[in-house]
Amino acid sequence: MKKIPIPVIIVAVLFILTGSIGLIYHRSDFNGSNFMSREAIWIFSVRLLAVICGVLLLCRINWARWLAIAWLLFHVILSASHSTAELITHIVFLILVAVLLFLPKSSAYFQSKNSIS
């Protein structure tokens, strides 16, 4: 089996941690009458998607790279209505994740899943 490249591990763990910490932080939004609110469902879905994305990256699923970038792009769009510092932070994270996931070593890891050796 091919070893998982360090950049992929870093991004995957960050996504798993971000999603998990977000779920824990917003747990009060999921209690009681707020559980089925539109906002609570969005928060839960976005945080859970981060965890799933991180796991799929570790499982060598190629389209998970694009999912990770789309997830961060969604946050860039959301942060456009917030502070400039938050917007810049999300843009920097988006660029970093894109670079790490598309390094030659990372790309080779995601190439043909059938040629596991």
Image: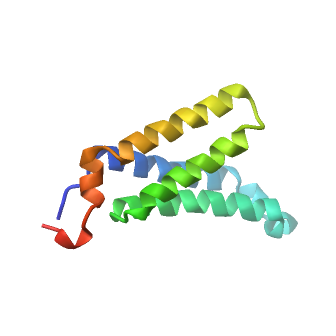
Q: Which residue is drawn at 17% across and 70% down?
A: 115
Residue 70 horizontal/vertical position (percent): 56, 54
Which one is nearer the viewer's eye here, 32 or 55? 55
Q: Give left or right: position of 115 versus 106.
A: left
In the rendered image of this protein, does residue 91 appear above or below residue 57? above
Q: In which quarter of the image is residue 96?
A: top left
Q: Residue at x 20, y 56 (%)?
A: 3
Q: Quadrant of residue 114?
A: bottom left
Q: Residue at x 67, y 49 (%)?
A: 25
Residue 57 horizontal/vertical position (percent): 39, 59
Callout count: 0
In the rendered image of this protein, does residue 97 appear above or below residue 48? above
The single residue placed furthest to the top in the displayed view is: 85
The single residue placed furthest to the right in the displayed view is: 33
Residue 58 horizontal/vertical position (percent): 35, 60
Q: Give left or right: position of 76 versus 67.
A: right
The C terminus is located in which quarter? bottom left
In the rendered image of this protein, does residue 7 appear above or below residue 55? above
Visual colour scheme: rainbow
In the rendered image of this protein, does residue 3 appear above or below residue 81? below
Which one is nearer the viewer's eye here, 90 or 25? 90
Residue 4 horizontal/vertical position (percent): 26, 54
Q: Give left or right: position of 80 versus 71.
A: right
The N terminus is located in which quarter? bottom left
**Is residue 49 visible in this depiction of the protein?**
yes
Q: Which residue is drawn at 57% across and 47% down?
A: 72
The single residue placed furthest to the bottom in the displayed view is: 114
